[in-house]
Image (spheres, grey):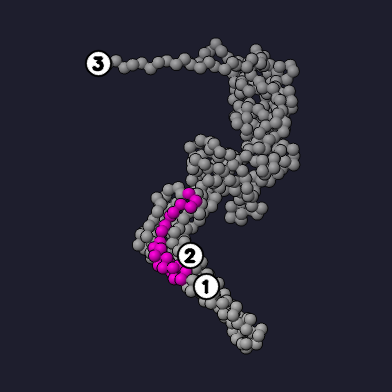
Amino acid sequence: MYNQQQPLTSPRRIAVGLALALTAGLISPAALAQTPAASRPPTPVSVVEIKPENTPATFEFTGKTASSRQVEINARVEGYLDKIAYVEGSLVKTGQLLFQLDPKPFQATLDSAKANLAQQEALLTRARQTLARVKPLAKQNAVSQQDLDNATAGVLTSEAQVQAAKAQVETAQLNLGYTTIKSPLNGLSSSANFREGALITPAGKNAQLTTIVQIDPMWVNFGVGENEVLKIKTQQEAGQLSKPGLDKVQVDLVLADGATYPQKGQITFVDPVVNAQTGTYNIRAVVPNPGNQLSPGQFVRVQLKGAFRPNAIMVPQVAVMQGPNGKFVFVVGPDNTAQPKPVQVGDWYGDQWIINSGLETGDRVVVDGAVRLQPGVPVQIKPAAAPAPEPAKVPSATPLKP
């Protein structure tokens, strides 16, 4: 019910109306500065004194994990699949047996090659013995020069045949070894493309048996927009941002559930060319994954840390208000009166604005109570509030049994 004893033009109603109009952007701070403040007691406010300090700068982007190495396991010889020796989808280690092809035909080929090698070595021994007998007879002209040439050629021919037989033995050994297919790396296995008894050929679609992906370390691919890069360069040239070398940038990951991944990463690749389709620079970071917590294809938030803003000025978000001419704050002057001051804000840092211009060292910015102020009104600075004590734990009541 309206109180008829209080006039509509009371100082309290005027103050509240002007404050609401100022907050809503209906009246500019400059216009209010020309309006004389009504006589009233000082308004209690809390302030923060501006003290420039070096402030860490964090940049966040959306990234996607990828395997740092992916290997297709292919057959190198033709044969029948005897055994699948791993659990599909499990982690496999370097040298672990994955597949076993039927080795019997390749073992027979190896035995035949070894027998041929032994035969050629025997022929070489006989050819050398023949040459050893012919040489002294040739010096005595007991045999013709042609007999000597034939004996020499026989040794050379046998030596060549021995080398060819050795190559056949080595090829047969390699083919026999290819029937045992092992993992070339530590990684996560995929399903097998064939079952026992299938004929595997080393060419065409029947060559790939499975795929192994390395997940430690893990790659994280993300893109930085061209506008963001230009903004960072502008801040560096203006002295508002100091960025370390690429090898000193720390990469943190935030998972989909909001948890911070414990391992830190490092940038290893920056594409010098802007991606024409996305308009971003493609960047890759390497992150250790010893516990296999990360899997290829995950979306993560990538935080780049290591840069800082020298002598940055920050104020709490609640201190910054929006007027028709831009953002402003209330500053308490030496006479303990509040005056609006326009500011240029930059990036966020936690729950604070980074002020690019408009404030100086020692300024006292109103934090709590700014919405009730008018230009030139007296204020009373409240002491900083002590942290609230934790509420006492009340033991839960035991339900009564009927």
The 10 Å Cα crowd at callout 2, few under 14, some 14 to 19, many 20 or more, is some
Which amino acid lies under the numbered mark 1 shown in the image of this protein?
Answer: Glu
Tag count? 3
What is the residue that sits farthest to the left in this orientation? 402
Q: CA distance from mark 2 to mark 1?
A: 19 Å
The 10 Å Cα crowd at callout 1, few under 14, some 14 to 19, many 20 or more, is some
Residue 400, percent from left and from top: 29, 15
Q: Secondary structure at mark 2?
A: helix
- Which comes sooner in the sequence, label 2 or label 1? 1
- Classify residue 340 by image quadrant: top right
The residue that label 3 is drawn on is 402
Q: Secondary structure at mark 3?
A: loop
Task: Work out whether residue 148 or residue 370 is closer to the camera in this orientation and state it.
Answer: 148
Q: Nearer the viewer, mark 2 or mark 3?
A: 2
Residue 285 appears anywhere in the view: yes
Q: Nearer the viewer, mark 3 or mark 1?
A: 1
Q: CA distance from mark 3 to mark 1?
A: 101 Å
- Which comes sooner in the sequence, label 3 or label 1? 1
The residue that label 1 is drawn on is 121
209 versus 317 height, above or below: below
Residue 22, percent from left and from top: 63, 27
- Which comes sooner in the sequence, label 2 or label 3? 2
Mark linked to residue 173? 2
**Residue at 25% across / 16% down in the picture?**
402
Mark linked to residue 264? none
Which amino acid lies under the numbered mark 3 shown in the image of this protein?
Answer: Pro
Residue 330, percent from left and from top: 67, 24
